[in-house]
Amino acid sequence: MIHPASKVLLRFAPSPTGALHLGGLRTALYNHLFAKKHGGEWILRIEDTDAARTVPGAVERIREALEWAGLEYDYGPGKGGPHAPYVQSERLDLYHSYAQKLLDSGHAYRCFCSPNRLAETRERLARSGSYSTYDKACLHLTEEEVARRVRAGEKSVIRMNDGHLPSRSTPPDLVFGPLKDSHASLPTDPVLLKSDLFPTYHLASVVDDHEMGITQVVRGEEWLPSLSLHLDLYASLSLTPPQFAHLPILLNPDGTKMSKRKGDVDVLDFKRRGWEPIAILNWLALAGWGIPQEDAQAPSSGEAKQAPDSTTLMSLEQMIKEFELSSLTHRRTVLDPVKLQYLNKHHLIKSMTTDDGLLALAEKVRDIVKEAQYTSAPYIKDVIVALQGRLTNLHELPILAPYFFVDPDWASDEAHDMSEGLSSVQYVVSKLKERLATETSIWSALDLSNIVREEVRKTGFPSKQCMMILRHALSGMKTGPGVGDILRVLGRDRAIARLANAQPPH
């Protein structure tokens, strides 16, 4: 159930350690869908507390990827908002004040142990069979000793005191339902504030989620082991936690976990390779969303409904309307590239049904074929329509049908294979050329497919052979749109010239 007391506010909080990858985009998408479905808003927050791993320009690339995908956040970098700044490195004083509250209450303490001592302690504890990772040596320092060492400039961290935690419960997850408390799997007395005075993710995220009024945290499954620590922090600070929803991890087709290090998951790479942003969102939205809403938390209507299958064509508005966290599978999900091809192809077809959509596609193609001679938007629109149903990705267009932009390559192996066994090439080509040259009607008004059939019939040669002859003359390629469609797109002058210049088989 969604808490009705306050307006729904979510956050997408990537670290600027590299490009936005597909898993991150899916998390942003689910935050967007949930927020908009419930009349709420969402924040882009940059979690850059690990300065050593921060990549210059990463924030700009994250914002570019979100903008390309059509996911517009309500508050965040470049937009501001009531809880700015939205970059954690600009909020350090806030984290320090909360760390001091934990120190004052005895829920945290300063630790002055050196890295070498910590490593030796971990090894000693492991050899003894202990599951502890730290011996709590600094927990027993007196206030006077701590103050003296701080004044002396000794470096320290602030640790959680896991031996002094208030009682709390573990609320059910919005995706996984009831959870077991995983406190035992946490390191002993986890670090909250590092010696460089930057907070760890755990302290910063809890503080920011509270300060910004986040009502639901929708994030990856990899944060489930940390949930107990976060709930401990909320309880230690006497704060009410938000509701949590953890998203199952996306897998590559070979079953391995998707990661930035493995490459080929950068969202902007998909932009560069010509995929439609709505197809990417559709693909990601349906990854793991496809179980009936039975024995799960009921949707707001109180009625169970069937979730869409993994190839349902959906607009962003439809995704918002249909989305339910309770319909997500608990299993890790393989992101199948074949499904992206299917969705992209059908979103292209859908875009071709309106003039505005077709024009937008034509403008994208212009960038791909900008070096060609024929690049006007009306011409490219005709090319796209002719190839309808054949295109999976707009970047395929100059590969599938280069003859619309340059003269056929009659010297290619494919053209040579086509011409083998063909006879009377010149006769068939010349008859069609003569017929077209005598047509005085507006080219677009001619039934070119019917004209081609009539002239083929007159030759007396088998239709299949004649069509291959004409394809060879007009395109030099075995497959493609119908001959009539090729003629229509080329236009009167280019079509007749191409038939006149057709290369006979050698």
Image (cartoon, rainbow, N blue to C red):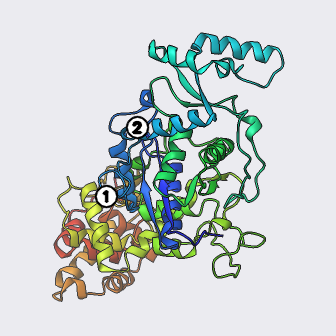
Is 56 positioned to the left or the right of 173 in the image? Answer: left
**Which one is in front, 106 or 317?**
106
Q: Residue 483: where, in percent of width, then height?
A: 35, 74
Which residue is rendered at x = 51% and y = 35% of the image? 100
The reply to whether dot 1 and dot 2 touch (C-beta < 8 Å) is no
Residue 472 in view, yes or no: yes
Seen as rendered, the residue at the extreme front is 144
Q: Residue 381: where, in percent of width, then height?
A: 28, 72
Q: Residue 138: where, in percent of width, then height?
A: 64, 19
Is 435 positioned to the left or the right of 59 in the image? Answer: left
Which residue is rendered at x = 74% and y = 47% of the image? 167
Q: Residue 404: where, in percent of width, then height?
A: 27, 63
- Which circle, 1 or 2, is nearer the viewer? 2
**Which one is in front, 52 or 334?**
52
Is 347 positioned to the left or the right of 57 in the image? Answer: right
Label 2 SS: helix
Q: Looking at the rendering, which quadrant does residue 159 occupy?
A: top right
**Which one is in front, 192 or 21?**
192
Q: Which residue is mark 1?
A: 402
Q: Residues within 10 Å of mark 2 (few under 14, many from 20)?
A: few
Q: Is residue 85 above or below residue 475?
A: above
Q: Is residue 74 above or below residue 466?
A: above
Which residue is rendered at x = 51% and y = 14% of the image? 149
Q: Which residue is mark 2?
A: 93
